[in-house]
Amino acid sequence: MIDLPQHISNQHPRSQNRFLRILFHPLTWVSVGLHALLLFMPTWEVDHSEAEEPEILEEEPVIEVESLAELLSQPDETPPPEVPVEPPPQTQAPAPPQQQVLTEVPEELPDELPLDELPPDELPPDEPPPDEPPPFDPAVQAQFKSALSNYLSVGASNAAGTSSNFDNTDQWPVPASWIPRSFSDPAAFFAADSIVDESFQPYPGVEFKYIGRNFDLVSSEGLGPAVQENGLSFEKIDTYGGSDLYVVISPEGNPMNYISLVDMKGSTAVFVWSDDPRQGVSGV
């Protein structure tokens, strides 16, 4: 039996029982052990040398203003805020056109390409290129010129039953004073040297007739019948050298000749061109 101190033993038995219960309670010894452990544990000193020192704000200088007018008169030194400059929009180059891809194969492919789709070096040698009109028949051209000469020369029958001859080409040249009133541009019809010596000879290679009939009769009774006899056609297309220019069209629809009719006030000068004189006279 444990000997209790005298002052405890003299207490009331109930108080002694309560003390013994506390003394022998497990938590009492656990608490005593933890306190003893804490007493023998080493202590650590906290180093406050590296602690951040509080930031000391610098006091802004106080500007003393004597009056409100002085404050308002001071310029604002605060720079304006910078406005960001946006780069210009980049223009995208247009996309190249997409080539159409043939996805379907025709059932039958042509054995030969049409002539108008062949390159010029692959055309048949005996056929002209498709972009050039076929040439007219030189025989038709010669026949037309012969017929034109006849219709220009022969007029109505006289009382003796013979036809009048209106071909006065052998009487050319006419007096030089007649030329300015009939030809606004003599150089369009006559060689330059012939204008100087006043012989007024047409360019070489140009068929010329001087007909003793007026302009309308030469056009209707001379050029018209000669064209119709050979299955040709003609139409006025422009003026050349100040006079009417006609084109004679072959049965194939191609230009065959160009004809100038110059009204000489009671007579008519006829020029038959092989090529369009507006493109320049070749002189051959």
Image: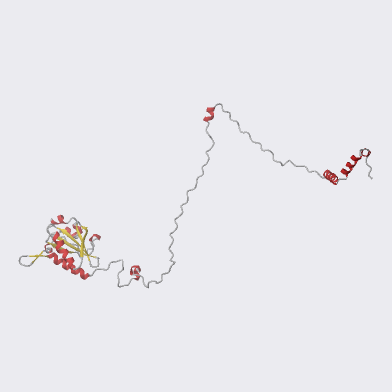
Q: Quadrant of residue 96?
A: bottom left
Please tell me whether residue 48 is drawn above or below residue 68 in the rendered image. Answer: below
Q: Quadrant of residue 137?
A: bottom left
Report whether residue 284 is seen: no
Q: Position of residue 65 (x, y in %)?
A: 56, 28
Of residues 271 and 98, the one nearer the viewer is 98
In the image, what residue occupies the spot 18% across and 66% down?
228
Q: Is residue 112 left or right of residue 135?
A: right
Could one spot residue 216 in this view of the protein?
yes
Quadrant containing the N terminus in the rendered view: top right
**Residue 142 position within the rendered picture, expressed as x and y whole percent measured from the top left:** 19, 69
Q: Is 131 left or right of 262, judged from the image as shown?
A: right
Left or right of 75? Residue 14 is: right
Residue 170, x across and y down, in percent:
12, 64
**Quadrant hosting residue 221:** bottom left
Q: Residue at x 52, y 30 (%)?
A: 72
Viewer-proximal residue, 48 or 20? 20
